[in-house]
Image (tube, helix red, strand yellow):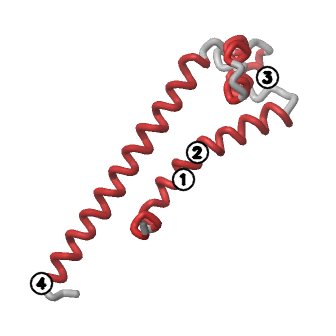
């Protein structure tokens, strides 16, 4: 268990926090901001393709799928895509970290065999 608490896993720990940070950001933007954050809408006054996606994620977090779809139908594509990217990145990071730990232990064993340590 001790080997999983090393500083090499700091990147994995940060990746595990990404969904919580995203959740908090969405909740703060929706509940405490009454103005639009869309630059396109601020400049032109028209909705862009992404308008409503933050409110849609907020409703998705509350499991209101119909309201989420009503705010922005693209939530059907964006939410699974973000989840997929997060999972793939997390798996790659973990594989890389385990490979790094394994290669470091092999190097240490070889040094011990040669009497360098």
C-beta proximity under 8 Å, tags 1 and 4: no
Q: Give the distance between the C-alpha atoms of the residues marked 4 and 3, in whole angstroms.
A: 67 Å
Q: How many marks?
A: 4
Left or right of residue 29, residue 6 in this image? left
Residue 89, how many percent across, how many down? 43, 41
**Residue 44 occupies which quadrant of the picture?**
top right
Report which residue position mark 4 lands on: 114
Q: Secondary structure at mark 2?
A: helix
Q: Earlier in the sequence, mark 3 or mark 2?
A: 2
Report which residue position mark 2 lands on: 18
Q: Secondary structure at mark 3?
A: helix
Q: Give the distance between the C-alpha atoms of the residues marked 1 and 2, in whole angstroms.
A: 7 Å
C-beta proximity under 8 Å, tags 1 and 2: yes
Q: Residue furthest front?
A: 1
Q: Give the distance between the C-alpha atoms of the residues marked 1 and 4, in whole angstroms.
A: 37 Å
In the depicted view, which residue is nearer to us: 34 or 58?
58
Q: Earlier in the sequence, mark 2 or mark 4?
A: 2
Residue plotted at (18% across, 87% down) = 116
Crowding at dot 1, Cα within 10 Å, few <14 / some 14-19 / many 20+, comes out as: few
Residue 84, how many percent across, how many down? 46, 31
C-beta proximity under 8 Å, tags 2 and 4: no
Residue plotted at (44% across, 44% down) = 90
Q: Give the distance between the C-alpha atoms of the residues marked 1 and 3, in whole angstroms.
A: 33 Å
Q: Earlier in the sequence, mark 1 or mark 4?
A: 1
Of badges 1 and 3, the one in the foreground is 1
Report which residue position mark 1 lands on: 14
Q: Quadrant of the C terminus?
A: bottom left
């Amino acid at each position: 268990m001790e080997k999983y608490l090393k500083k090499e896993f700091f990147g994995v720990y940060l990746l595990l926090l990404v969904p919580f940070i995203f959740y908090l950001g969405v909740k703060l933007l929706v509940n405490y901001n009454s103005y639009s954050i869309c630059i396109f809408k601020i400049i032109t006054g028209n909705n862009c393709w992404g308008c409503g996606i933050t409110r849609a994620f907020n409703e998705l977090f509350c499991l209101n799928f119909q309201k989420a779809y009503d705010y922005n139908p693209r939530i059907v594509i964006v939410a699974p895509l973000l989840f997929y990217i997060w999972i793939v990145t997390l798996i790659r990071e973990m594989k890389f970290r385990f490979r790094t730990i394994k290669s470091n232990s092999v190097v240490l064993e070889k040094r011990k065999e040669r009497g360098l340590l």
